[in-house]
Image: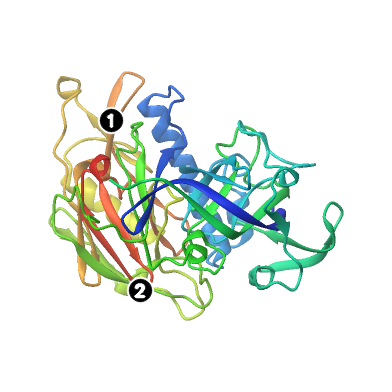
Amino acid sequence: MKKLTLLLALLAAALSISCSDAAIRTQLTRADAGRGLTRHQLLRRMARRSKARAARLLSATGSSSPATASAVPGMNQPLDTEYVVSFAIGTPPQPVQATLDTGSDLIWTQCQPCPSCFDQTLPYYDPSLSSTSAVLPCNSSACQQLPISSCGAQWWGTNTCVYTYSYGDKSGDAAVPGLAFGCGLFNNGVYSANTTGTGIAGFGRGALSLPSQLKVDNFSYCFTDITGSTPSPVLLGLPENLYAGATGAVQTTPLIQSSDNPTFYYLSLKGITVGSTRLAVPESAFALTKNGTGGTIIDSGTAVTSLPPRVYGLLHDAFVSQVKLPVTSDEPLCFAVPSAAAGKKQEVPKLVLHFEGATLDLPRENYVFEVDEGGQSNMCIAIFSSGGDMTTIGNYQQQNLHVLYDLAGNKLSFVPAHCDKV
């Protein structure tokens, strides 16, 4: 897997976000919003991104070999961007559009002089234009937090922290001084021309992530219709009306920490029910192993949920046995809709995810999609095989759920909500 080589600078960040009550609020935009794509095109792009993301996550956790990741078609294309958050850094502020990523920690954007960078719509960030930008020395605590770092840089002096990183009412603007922010000069790998955004906003569990640097104990988001254009809110901290727009009961499940992969948000998934059938899968199929492989994560950077091959096979068979329509595709699993019923929603078995202490009974729109292809109407299940032993809960399954990451309490809560009203 190719890596991103970046320079780390210490910048004062003026975030273009709204402060309300005790929380910082901003908006997320779907990466494909405003591109004029059909629903079918949007779903196909999401599927490709999800397969590529699953391969990278498996490789990163040691659950598969690097060859698995590189074998995914389109792996070197900009497949990972799902949601983009806009803010600004420096003084005076310069605009940034970063991918929200709960699967990484570092916050970074491309910077001048950028000898090897992917194309972006916004100008590259120019540290020389900011009165509050300064490089981090090699012995700084932020530099020590990076997995691979060294001293020396052609552009910013020999004591500069250089690193390699591989892969999220009463209102007003908030300014956060002294934010450790990555300045990317050599950027490649899964990024290339036409990538949405300028970098990544890491929301993982590490010390360099945005929630960690802002010293907030909680953050939450609420994803609107995944094929729509309505922005999705993200909150850092707890507002007084946290669950405004909720349409059901709040449920809570523990977050599990892994010393091998400390960035990820692991959950305790116990089982899956399709219609009347509880899949005959042991809890160990979803569990994190002692050597850090497997497990179940919730991930903002993955569009569609993926399951280990054996679990996906059982889910596939459970739907096939209960849906009385011809199968047109095995992955994603799709059924042919009779022409007389085209345009009408077909009955489909319920899909329920059983977590420790919580049950996620998915609404139909969070796991089913309809597409017309070659004059044939199809009803498809938005679940894929991960190709390895990891389970990833994607954002298609999180639509219109207000999801709260309680970092201090080490737990995750969710509630059905009208996300455009949160």
**Taking 382 as reference, is 276 left or right?**
left
Circle 2 sits in a helix, a strand or a loop, which is it?
loop
Which mark is drawn over residue 37?
Answer: none
Q: Residue at x 74, y 74 (%)?
A: 139
**Taking 144 as reference, is 302 left or right?**
left
Closer to the camera in the image, 52 or 329: 52
Q: Position of residue 266 (x, y in %)?
A: 40, 68
Circle 1 sits in a helix, a strand or a loop, which is it?
strand
In the rendered image, is residue 137 in sight?
A: yes
Q: Give the quarter of the image for residue 377.
A: top left
Query: How would you rate the neighbour count of disc 2 (Cα within 10 Å): few for under 14, some for 14-19, many for 20 or more?
Result: some
In the rendered image, is residue 395 in sight?
A: no
The mark lying in front, picked from 2 and 1, is 2
Q: Position of residue 275 (x, y in %)?
A: 15, 53
Q: Residue at x 65, y 68 (%)?
A: 142
Give above or below for 123 relative to 265. Answer: above
Give above or below for 251 relative to 69. Answer: below
Closer to the camera in the image, 173 or 408: 173
Which mark is drawn over residue 378?
Answer: 1
Name the amino acid type tagged 2. Answer: Asn
Quadrant for the N terminus in the image: bottom right
Q: Which residue is mark 2?
A: 410
Q: Residue at x 63, y 48 (%)?
A: 90
Q: Position of residue 117 (x, y in %)?
A: 72, 41
**Taking 293 as reference, is 73 left or right?**
right
Q: Residue at x 46, y 58 (%)?
A: 102
Closer to the camera in the image, 165 or 294: 165
Find the distance from the CA under tag 2 to the CA under tag 1.
41 Å
